[in-house]
Image (cartoon, grey):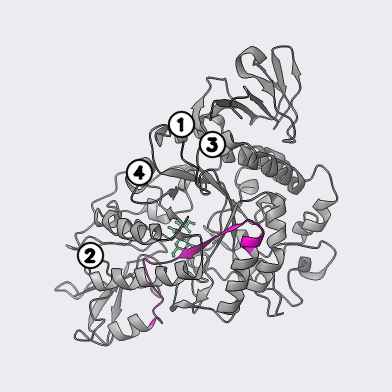
Amino acid sequence: TQEPNWWQGAAIYQIYPRSYLDTTGNGVGDLKGISEKLPHIAELGADAVWISPFVRSPMLDFGYDVSDYRAVDPLFGTLEDFQALLDRAHELGLKIIMDQVLSHTSNQHPWFLESREGRENAKADWYVWADPKKDGTVPNNWLSVFGGSSWQWEPRRGQYYLHNFLREQPDLNYHNPEVQDAVLDVCRFWLDMGVDGFRLDVCAFYFHDSDLRDNPDNPDINPGAHFRFNPYSMQRHTRDIAQPENLAFLERLRALSDAYEDRALLGELHEGDGARLHREYTAPDRLQLAYGYWFLGADEIDAGLIRDTAAALGHETRDGWPCWALDNHDFHRAVTRLGKEDCPEAVTVILAALTCLRGACCIYQGSELGLAQAHVPYDRIVDPYGREFYPSFQGRDGARTPMPWEGGEPHGGFSKTEPWLPVPPEHLDRAVDRQKTLPGSTRNQMSRFLNWRREQPALRHGGMAFLDLPQPVLGLTREHGGETVTCLFNLGADEAVIEMPETRCGAALEGHGFGAPREGDLVRLPAHGAFFASTGGAG
Ligand code: TEU
């Protein structure tokens, strides 16, 4: 059989670089800070690190607005710092996945500065320009994810340009082959440098409907609890933003990445019809991994939701793999979202379950500490999305506050000066140094579990089937190389007793730290506990 790839079943730790560690004393995290803390991530038992954007940017969307794709922003360091980070990660056995924001640029990118000057220049057609309607109004009814029309007037050209996000984030025109070639060159630059993969920001947004047709009325403008923080899904008018042309471009990108050894593409898909997009976008010649919002917006997660979501993705037949996530820099932290601030272990077991599903799993910085969403007072809110929708939506800053490293130090040891976002005092008790000395801490439980999981090939690479068990228990098996591992997760707050005879599911596995004793044929799952058994196998 073929050697499994590193990205299959990888635990991917996500870093938001502004908030990891500040080594220069400017209140903002940097690449040297990440390098210094890579051992924390390796000890945690992660396989790879996804770093949110650190290339040059005016920082209106904190790096998701790129003004130079080939330079490290001076706030974060230099290209040499990044090369050192890459080398250090590789020494520690960690892969580095770089965030590539290719759907749009900053309005300060030289491509846009040239494009906006007039209709004749070399970059005139690199962005999506359109004339106003006869009455002078915007070309159509498209809305921006961050609120308002997605069209912005540009007096120099006497035309509107498209922006799916901030008006400072003009959308590139992928119908122009020169644009495709230019972004592929950007990717080549970083692949040559040795990055192991890309996380592709909003990769279903690359192309736009070239006829600029109005979006039809959206009959379903109340999408329910799962996505309530995403105005995009609540728009009055929606057409599936994912244009068919995206797929051929992803094939070009995959061909490029396959020309290098062992690289992987992890594409961010928006929610919408997640299962269909997932099927289309993950294919042998497209993405290896597709990241969905399946659990990110959810404020209730039970065994049924996990099972239904994985089943909808057709986990048995797909070549591409899902990339699960419970938290990231865009959503409220899960501990708060799920109402578990007093009981972070209820969230740890969910995260453990996600890492045992077929697929990779992202773990956002601070989740290993069980951090709650921070309250950021209005005068400290810097997320433009938050300022726009305050107070009904207070933005994303509460999930982006600095990592608390040392509970007894000012600013949690993150920085010597006042950081760009405050470190909430209630995070200090959960700081890394404090948790390291407590045997049962979230950090220690995660680290024990992830390191144990790393050594279970079936949990990383195996095929998956679900067991038919009553809520709140999630049961599944993973099968690889003749071994079947049975996993039980108790997502409830009471003990659950499940019949699981050794003759059927093999001997109990030890060392994962979720300790559930077995009595005869019965497994006693404590609240938020888990159980694993293995039939052995070829070994
Ligand atoms: O996010 C894509 C996206 O659609 C988000 O706007 C999401 O809907 C929202 O944040 C939910 O709260 C990606 C990045 O992850 C995000 O940080 C960027 O702002 C966005 O793209 C634009 O590049």
Element type at mark 3: loop
Query: Of tags 1 and 3, which is closer to the observer?
Result: 3
Q: Earlier in the sequence, mark 2 or mark 3?
A: 2
Q: Is residue 244 visible?
A: yes
How many marks overall?
Answer: 4
Amino acid found under the numbered disc labelled 4:
Asp
Q: Which residue is mark 3?
A: 357
Q: Earlier in the sequence, mark 2 or mark 1?
A: 2
Dot 1, how many residues are within 10 Å of its Cα: few (below 14), some (14-19), or many (20+)? few
Q: For the residues marked 1 and 4, what is the alpha-carbon distance in whole angstroms?
A: 14 Å
Q: Which residue is mark 1?
A: 308
Q: Whole-percent x and y of residue 57?
A: 49, 77
Contact check, label 2 and label 4, Cβ < 8 Å: no
Q: For the residues marked 2 and 3, what is the alpha-carbon distance in whole angstroms?
A: 42 Å
Q: Which residue is mark 4?
A: 273
Query: Of tags 4 and 3, which is closer to the observer?
Result: 3
Query: Of tags 2 and 1, which is closer to the observer?
Result: 1
Q: In the picture shown, does residue 318 fall above or below 508?
A: below
Tell me which corner region of the image, top left, top right, bottom left or bottom right, holds residue 499: top right
Element type at mark 1: helix
Amino acid found under the numbered disc labelled 2:
Asn
